[in-house]
Image (spheres, rainbow, N blue to C red):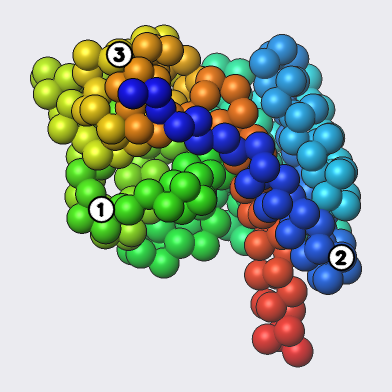
Amino acid sequence: MTATPMLGTALAERIRARVADGVRAVGGVGLTTVLVGDDPASDTYIRLKHRAAVAAGIRATDLRLPASTDQDELLATLGELNADDEVDAVLVQLPLPPHLDETAVIRAVDPQKDVDGFHPLNAGELYLGRPTLVPATARGVLALLVEYQVELRGAEVVVVGRSAIVGKPTAHLLLQADATVTVCHSRTVDLSRHTRAADVLVVAVGRPGVVTAATVKPGSVVIDVGGGDVDADVAEVAGFLTPPRGGVGPMTIACLLENALLCARARDAARTQLG
């Protein structure tokens, strides 16, 4: 058996085209990203996000702050962005330098402008089954499963990883799709016992080779969020498998742009209600 590749590139392009149409319909969307410090990986991510945003017609502002920025300065900057009517969506690139309180910074972003979907209010809406702004990678995983017509209702789904950015929101979306969801993590005893039982396996731990062919159910659907968490030999066992490149990655950026459009639409709706 050779797994069918679950490619996200074409689907991501369709989503980005829809976003571009939506941006024109609302009269423009303003996205501001905030990067503190000069972490090379974060710089790369920001550049990719800006390139995609500009291509979709989004007004993207790249705000760079020195690594020495203190908590009060960063919170003051976010307060200004929250109050700026030209800014519809705000993204604070993580991780932050260690002297900054990441939790406080996430809480400081206006929930309506929280394009990442990390604010406790948006996380709570997802938990209650009323998803509004959902972390982009989780949205992307679900969109891929729908694209490839994977039956989730009643399926045994295992999510490996419990981060607030990927694992937990993905698990909640899968629950809302009527899957039976197990979340595994670093303290799980006998991880392979769970992964071998999964009809759908989502791996998001950022640890190369945590899942191998011997730990996967034959014919199952395997989503490698980390782009390397799953060994290449899993393709000989699984029915469907995302590749390390061109799978979840393009979906994350496309769904982030979709969230920016959702931010703008929600703010327009709020202004309309206020008269």
CA–CA distance between discs 2 and 1?
36 Å
**Rendered position, 91 above or below 146:** above
The residue nearer to you, when weighing 1 against 87, is 1
Measured as percent of width and height from the top left, residue 16 is found at 74, 50
Give me the residue at 77% from left, 54% from top.
Answer: 17
Give me the residue at 41% from left, 27% from top.
Answer: 3
For marks 3 and 2, give the one nearer the viewer. 3
Residue for badge 1: 179
Residue for badge 3: 212
Residue for badge 2: 24
For marks 2 and 1, give the one nearer the viewer. 1
Measured as percent of width and height from the top left, residue 250 is found at 64, 35
Q: Quadrant of the N terminus?
A: top left
Give me the residue at 52% from left, 62% from top.
Answer: 132
For marks 1 and 3, give the one nearer the viewer. 3
The amino acid marked with disc number 2 is: Arg
